[in-house]
Amino acid sequence: MSGQRNPEKKHSEASLARKELKRRRIAILFIQCAEQLLREEGISGLSTRRLADAAGYSSATLYSYFEDLDELILYASFKYRREYIERVAKELSEDMTALEQYRRIYQIFNACSFRDPKIYMNLYFGKHSSRIQTVIERYYRLFPEELDAPSGLIRTLLRQGSRIECDKITTRRLAEEGVIRPENADRVAEMMVRAQETFIYDLTVHPDRDPEAQNEAFMKLFDYMIAVS
């Protein structure tokens, strides 16, 4: 009858749904195990074998879900990114000027990234950083509850992978408010991100340096770049 569904098709759809659910659960498990090992031992303590053993699967299974170890670490690093976003949500307000917001965002980002420079270097400037937007989309399909955000700005930060494109949102507001010249808006965003990349990299090779001193040095450079733009 036309109103009845084909039993074989219904069974096939249910089977596919179960397989997709299983794949989702395994991917989440690998990410959660990687995050735990990152927090306990840092990036240097991670290996494909360690992660596979922690998750209870083979290394071959890991590679059927992630391109390589670096990509899995990228997913696990999103938990660190969440801490940054949560601080931004708490410390930014709608009555702040664009410059006040931009400055505070960098102070928060520096506090987080300078504390864990290897994590943030891999996340935003590492091997897979050029495809971070695709990673973000998959990540929030796996963890949709983390996409909840109280404001449009925070939702934008959550979904935006490129640091430069994210900065452009604010530097264009700076131009609209007359803080910088309009023709410099995109250039300022790129210079800020490239400068910050240098500071983060510097801490990965000189871990003995004081993150707070690095933050202070960066903010002086931040103020200078805004003043001359």
Image: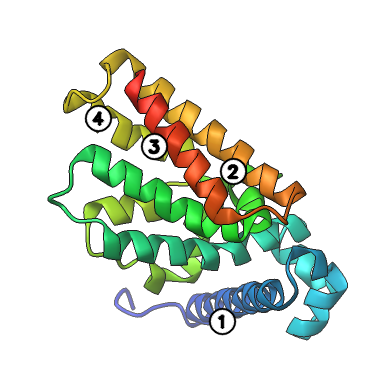
Estimate the spatial distance between the alpha carbons at disc 3 and disc 1, rounded to whole Å. Answer: 41 Å
Which residue in the protein does label 1 denote? 18
Q: Amino acid at mark 2?
A: Arg
Q: Residue at x 64, y 49 (%)?
A: 121
| Figure quadrant of residue 25 | bottom right
Secondary structure category for the residue under label 4: helix
Per the image, the residue denoted by label 3 is 167
Q: Nearer the viewer, mark 4 or mark 3?
A: 4
**3D distance between C-alphas at marks 1 and 2:** 29 Å
In the figure, residue 39 lies in which quadrant? bottom right
Q: Nearer the viewer, mark 1 or mark 2?
A: 2
Q: Dot 1, how many residues are within 10 Å of its Cα: few (below 14), some (14-19), or many (20+)?
A: few
Q: Nearer the viewer, residue 55 or 84?
A: 84
- Can residue 50 be seen by looking at this rendering? yes
The mark closer to the camera, 2 or 3, is: 3
Q: Please tell me which residue lies in front, 165 or 174.
A: 174
- Tell me which numbered mark, 1 or 4, is placed earlier along the sequence: 1
The reply, left or right, for residue 48 in relation to residue 38 is right
Whole-angstrom CA distance, mark 2 to mark 3, is 18 Å
Residue at (25% x, 56% y) in the render: 92
**Marker disc for residue 131:** 2
- Amino acid type at circle 3 is Asp
**Earlier-in-chain disc, 4 versus 3:** 3
The residue labelled by disc 4 is 174
Mark 1 lies on a secondary structure that is helix
Q: Quadrant of residue 115?
A: bottom right
**Residues at discs 4 and 3 in contact (Cβ within 8 Å):** no
Q: How far apart in space, not on screen, are marks 4 and 2 (Cα)?
A: 28 Å
How far is the residue under mark 4 from the one under mark 3?
11 Å
The residue located at (41%, 55%) in the rendering is 108
Q: Residue at x 34, y 43 (%)?
A: 103
